[in-house]
Image (spheres, rainbow, N blue to C red):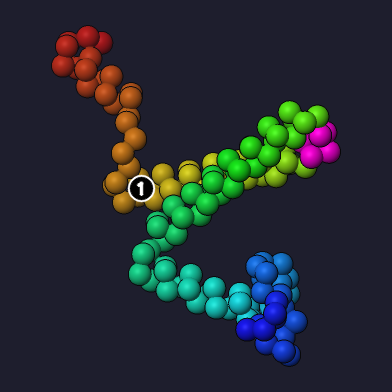
Amino acid sequence: MSQGKINDSNQHAVKHGGAGAVKRIQEGKPLIGLAAEVEREVMADLATAGREELVIEAATRLHTCMRLYWGAVQTAADAGDLEGLDRYCKRFGWLATSALRAWREVREEARAAGTDKALDYEAILAAQRERSGDD
């Protein structure tokens, strides 16, 4: 790879490739360059680790970014930087919503697999009432 390019004839930046990948998806074109490499990695991870692990990874990363942006929100608020506060709050809000949706998906995956460790409080209380003879 050369400086910031996949090769001399390809103008897609190596920085992250996300914007170019989104554009190609919107245009209905296959991914190329760095995006195509990462797509192959994702498909390999899906085949070896499974969908549940990929969902957990996505939820974890979104939650991590959310926490980092929360720090930026606090810093901007402390500094009285209203423009920064507004900008960081918007990003934090998007990340928080996305992370919560991803965690909900993780829980649904666990429920479907029968590995959900969450307590069913209603069932626990009902069982206790049944054992003690209370209704």
Residue behind mark 1: 110
Magenta part of the chain = 81-86
Residue at image position (50%, 77%) is: 40
At which x and y percent is residue 69? 65, 42
Coordinates of residue 56 in the picture (x, y in percent) = 44, 52
Q: Position of residue 34 (x, y in %)?
A: 61, 77
Let me know if residue 47 is in the magenta part: no
Q: Is residue 100 above or below residue 9?
A: above
Q: Amino acid at mark 1?
A: Ala
Height in image: 96 above or below 133? below
Badge 1: residue crowd in 10 Å (few <14, some 14–19, many ≥20): some
Q: Position of residue 111 (x, y in %)?
A: 35, 45
State the quadrant of the N terminus: bottom right
Residue 83 falls within the magenta-colored stretch? yes
Rendered view: 99 above or below 78: below
* Horizontal relation, residue 42 to residue 11: left or right: left
The answer to which of 21 and 72 lies nearer the viewer is: 72
The structure residue drawn at horizontal position 16% and vertical position 16%, both measured from the top left corner, is 131
Q: Is residue 11 left or right of residue 35?
A: right
* 6 lies left or right of 41: right
Q: On the picture, is 106 further left or further right than 82?
A: left
Q: Secondary structure at mark 1?
A: helix
Q: Please tell me which residue is depicted at 29% across the width and 46% down the height of the picture.
A: 115
The kind of secondary structure the magenta stretch mainly shows is helix
Q: State whether residue 24 appears in this view.
A: no
